[in-house]
Image (cartoon, rainbow, N blue to C red):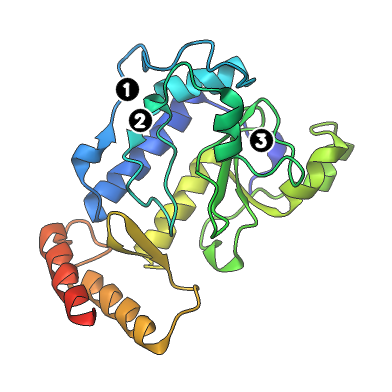
């Protein structure tokens, strides 16, 4: 388990972690054309000063300007999309953007060096990236999603004692899954490779732990079997086009 004292933030490493994850999504079920790579100088659509009233640090804005993005229609985790920051109008109110991507301020005060990456979801998939500590938070992360990749070793309550965070930041962080940024994406990959996350189509990924009827459970297991029958998770053997076509035909029989 990595200690928070051993972790540093790197924009370039963070960009690469996003890029590698999108490559896996494209290899498994997403459309490659839905991934947009930034120009060398960053997205011109994102002002270097950010949006009015956004009140985020230069590091946050710099990261958003250099990230690759995937279509907001694509599920990158169960019932969860990434915010396509580079498509937001330059004159949008930053307060509205924060409201759409961060928890209610009464529940969690999100500081200026932390940015929300996901629209607020009824399933609770709230992902936040911390450019100061170099970690990702999955707020109220389900135990079942914490597969293979260890979280940060330290307890956020210790971070207060070490002067890393103010006391009013402890509660929401302690209730989150916390990984190094690169490890966070490796954890998501592990969920896909083990079919803990099950893509039905690019805009519909389900989690195995969601409650469902017996019939819907049979459908889920049928989709998982199709992936395995087509070679997943061995990318050298996996036949994406045939797999997705078979899943589509199978789902039509389940309607």
Task: Give the label, 1 or 3, closer to the camera.
Answer: 1
For disc 2, the marked residue is 68
Q: Is residue 91 at least partly visible in the picture?
A: yes
Mark toward the start of the polypeptide (1 vs 3): 3
Q: Residue furthest bottom?
A: 214
The disc, 1 or 2, on the residue closer to the chain's N-terminal end is: 1
Give the SS element for disc 2.
loop
Q: Give SS at disc 1.
A: loop
Residue 235 horizontal/vertical position (percent) = 22, 56
Q: Which residue is mark 1?
A: 38
Q: Residues within 10 Å of mark 2 (few under 14, many from 20)?
A: many
The alpha-carbon separation of the residues under discs 1 and 2 comes to: 6 Å
Q: Earlier in the sequence, mark 2 or mark 3?
A: 3
- Residue at x-position 32% and y-position 80%: 221
Numbered disc 3: secondary structure = helix
Q: Which quarter of the rendering shows the C terminus? A: bottom left
Instruction: Give the spatial CA distance, label 2 vs label 3.
Output: 26 Å
Residue 25 is left or right of residue 158, and the answer is: left
The answer to whether 7 is drawn above or below residue 185 in the figure is above
Estimate the x, y position of residue 241 in percent, counting from the top left. Answer: 12, 58
Depth check: 206 or 193 in front?
206
Image x and y of residue 93, in percent: 55, 22
User: Which residue corresponds to mark 3?
Assistant: 6
Is mark 1 in CB contact (under 8 Å) with mark 2? yes
Tell me which corner region of the image, top left, top right, bottom left or bottom right, holds residue 136. top right
């Amino acid at each position: 388990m990595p200690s928070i004292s051993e972790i540093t933030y790197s924009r370039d490493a963070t960009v690469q972690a996003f890029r590698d994850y999108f490559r896996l999504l494209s290899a498994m079920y997403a459309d490659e054309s839905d991934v947009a790579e930034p120009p060398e100088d960053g997205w011109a659509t994102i002002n270097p000063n950010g949006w009015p009233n956004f009140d985020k640090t230069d590091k946050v804005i710099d990261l958003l300007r250099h990230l690759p993005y995937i279509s907001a229609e694509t599920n990158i985790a169960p019932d969860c999309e990434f915010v396509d920051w580079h498509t937001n109008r330059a004159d949008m109110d930053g307060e509205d953007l924060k409201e759409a991507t961060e928890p209610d301020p009464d529940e969690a005060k999100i500081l200026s060096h932390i940015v929300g990456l996901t629209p607020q979801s009824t399933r609770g998939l709230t992902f936040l990236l911390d450019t100061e500590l170099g970690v990702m938070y999955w707020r109220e992360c389900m135990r079942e999603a914490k597969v293979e990749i260890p979280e940060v070793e330290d307890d956020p309550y210790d971070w207060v004692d070490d002067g890393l965070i103010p006391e009013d930041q402890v509660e929401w962080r302690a209730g989150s899954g916390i990984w190094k940024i690169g490890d966070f994406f490796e954890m998501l990959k592990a969920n896909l490779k083990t079919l803990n996350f099950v893509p039905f189509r690019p805009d519909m990924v389900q989690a195995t732990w969601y409650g469902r009827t017996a019939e819907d459970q049979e459908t889920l297991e049928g989709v998982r079997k199709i992936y395995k029958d087509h070679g997943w998770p061995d990318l050298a053997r996996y036949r994406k086009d045939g797999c997705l076509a078979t899943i589509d035909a199978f789902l039509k029989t389940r309607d």
